[in-house]
């Protein structure tokens, strides 16, 4: 099952070169380059902050510090953007690289790794920008932020587990990407990003318990906004689910790999 992983070591220099090439090509195609990956989530957070805090009067309970709700939004959107970028890119990666796959023979397992590298670069730039913005509100970075590596890893596992399986399905059923656009929008609102657990209704609150991204986003909120010790145990559920999905995606990828190029 894992035979396709062996070429990774033999061609290990290809991966950083591919990630760098993709990053440069994206920058070259746009006048403001990679800033789009930072501006889009920041613009979304700004709109929500203005509408919900200024118009609807939404506040963050337990914290009287000015700008707390805006920081809450930024922390949640930073966590969510990493998950959704990897998920979306994985769903479309085989179609996106179809010309390359048809012309050049290389291990297809490179594609998810290139997707991960690009997503980490984009999310890293967003994270640095968010860190500067929230510092202006008085929420300064601390050593506790290092622990955010844990929820980041969990969200990567979940995104890959779901994204690779759906990416393979998307080769044969092209409606998958469109359906998942709707699903991820719904998923966003079923994750405590723009509201807290206390503000969620009883029906939504029950769904939050089963949402694997809930503890991931709450971990970000605890570390960045509330500045309390996060609930490490809460990550067990999404981590186990992510591991199971990763194994499933590896199996699906392995079985479908010989037919991918012919189906494109």
Image (spheres, rainbow, N blue to C red):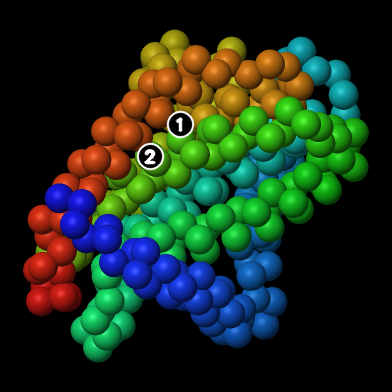
Find residue 225 and report its horizontal and vertical position in percent: 74, 27
Q: Residue at x 67, y 22 (%)?
A: 222
Around disc 1, counting alpha carbons within 10 Å, would you say few (fewer than 14), some (14 to 19), or many (20 or more)?
Answer: many
Residue located beneath label 1 in the image:
213
Q: CA distance from mark 2 to mark 1?
A: 9 Å
Q: Is residue 114 above or below residue 240?
A: below
Please tell me whether mark 1 sits on a helix, a strand or a loop: helix
Q: Is residue 171 left or right of residue 262?
A: right
Q: Is residue 235 above or below residue 7?
A: above
Quadrant of res 134:
top right
Around disc 2, counting alpha carbons within 10 Å, would you say few (fewer than 14), some (14 to 19), or many (20 or more)?
Answer: many
Residue located beneath label 2 in the image:
158
Q: Is residue 133 left or right of residue 120?
A: right
Q: Nearer the viewer, mark 2 or mark 1?
A: 2
Quadrant of res 202:
top left
Find residue 235 and report its horizontal and vertical position in percent: 47, 23
Dots 2 and 1: beta carbons under 8 Å? yes
Q: Is residue 177 left or right of residue 207?
A: left
Q: Residue at x 15, y 50 (%)?
A: 1
Q: 4 or 169, which is in the foreground?
A: 4
Residue furthest out toward the front: 10
Q: Is residue 51 visible?
A: no
Q: 208 or 213, which is in the foreground?
A: 213
């Amino acid at each position: 099952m894992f035979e396709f992983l062996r070429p990774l070591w033999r061609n290990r220099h290809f991966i950083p070169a591919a990630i760098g090439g993709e990053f440069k090509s994206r920058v070259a195609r746009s006048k403001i380059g990679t800033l789009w990956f930072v501006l889009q989530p920041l613009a979304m957070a700004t709109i929500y902050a203005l509408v919900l805090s200024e118009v609807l009067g939404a506040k963050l309970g337990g914290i009287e510090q000015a700008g707390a709700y805006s920081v809450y939004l930024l922390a949640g959107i930073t966590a969510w953007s990493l998950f959704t970028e990897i998920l979306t890119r994985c769903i479309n990666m085989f179609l996106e690289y179809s010309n390359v796959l048809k012309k050049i023979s290389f291990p297809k397992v490179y594609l998810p790794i290139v997707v991960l590298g690009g997503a980490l670069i984009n999310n890293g730039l967003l994270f640095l920008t968010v860190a500067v913005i929230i510092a202006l509100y008085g929420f300064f970075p601390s050593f506790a932020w290092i622990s955010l590596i844990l929820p980041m890893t969990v969200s990567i596992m979940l995104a890959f587990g779901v994204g690779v399986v759906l990416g393979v399905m998307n080769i044969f059923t092209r409606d998958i990407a469109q359906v998942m656009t709707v699903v991820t929008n719904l998923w966003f609102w079923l994750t405590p990003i723009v509201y807290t657990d206390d503000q969620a209704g009883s029906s939504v609150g029950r769904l939050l318990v089963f949402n694997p991204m809930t503890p991931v986003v709450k971990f970000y909120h605890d570390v960045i906004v509330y500045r309390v010790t996060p609930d490490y145990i809460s990550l067990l559920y999404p981590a186990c689910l992510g591991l199971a999905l990763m194994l499933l995606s590896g199996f699906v990828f392995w079985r479908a790999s010989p037919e991918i190029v012919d189906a494109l």
